[in-house]
Amino acid sequence: MMVAVTSTTARSGPVRGPLRWLRRRPLDLIDVFVYVVVLNLAIEYLPAVISETFTLSLLTAVLLKVALELVVLLKGVVLARLRAATTRRAKAAAGVLLWVVAAGSKVLVLALVDLVFGDAVSLGGFIPVTLLVLALLLSRATVRRVLSEPPGEE
């Protein structure tokens, strides 16, 4: 006999959709909060980075989260190929592919933001978006490290 386990809330019964997903992956929600903070600091201090409203910056943070997760996943595949390469030619090809993923991810982010939000959001050009992505990933790693420390260790 198989028993299905579902999350429930006091008010509405089983939790479905995004709430169920967020309960299974709370770090993703924290990442989006971190991205919102970093993105809004960039909007405030970098003239090339523009968002017309806070809601658009929140939606941009969600878009960045999804795009960067895909890029990190792809980068992992390319790194595995690089580590598995046995010939110089294969290592060189994987190295070039890694560079293409690294550079292409910035172009992808710019294109996605332009496609989804048009002129309402601008992340600047290649250099500002590269700095923004580095700040997002560094901030995310720092917050995750802080949250993963066991209580009592300071």
Image: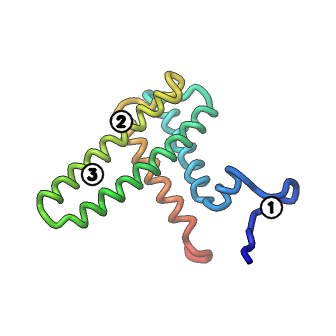
Question: Disc 2 vs disc 1: Cβ atoms closer than 8 Å?
Answer: no
Which amino acid, mark 1? Answer: Thr
- Residue 140 left/right relative to 108: right
> Could you tell me the amino acid type at mark 3?
Leu
Q: Residues within 10 Å of mark 3 (few under 14, many from 20)?
A: many
Q: Secondary structure at mark 2?
A: helix
Residue sticking out furthest to the front: 1
Residue 121: percent from left, percent from top: 51, 28
**Residue corresponding to mark 2:** 107
Residue shown at the point (27%, 45%) measured from the top left: 100
In the picture provided, is 153 more to the left or to the right than 3? Answer: left
Q: Nearer the viewer, residue 122 or 80?
A: 80
- Looking at the picture, how far across and down is residue 142, in whole percent? 48, 59
Within 10 Å of disc 2 (Cα), the crowding (few <14, some 14-19, many 20+) is: some
Nearer to us: label 1 or label 3: 1
Residue at 75% from the left image edge and 73% from the top image edge? 3
Instruction: Name the residue: 41% across, 55% down.
Output: 73
* Among numbered discs 2 and 1, the one appearing first in the sequence: 1
Inspect the image, locate mark 2, and give the three-letter code of the amino acid beneath it.
Answer: Val
Q: CA–CA distance between discs 2 and 1? A: 42 Å
Which part of the image, by quadrant, shows the N terminus? bottom right
Residue designated by label 3? 98
Q: Quadrant of the C terminus?
A: bottom right
Give the residue pinned by disc 1: 8
Depicted 148 relative to depicted 128: above or below: below
Residue 84 in the image: above or below residue 39: below
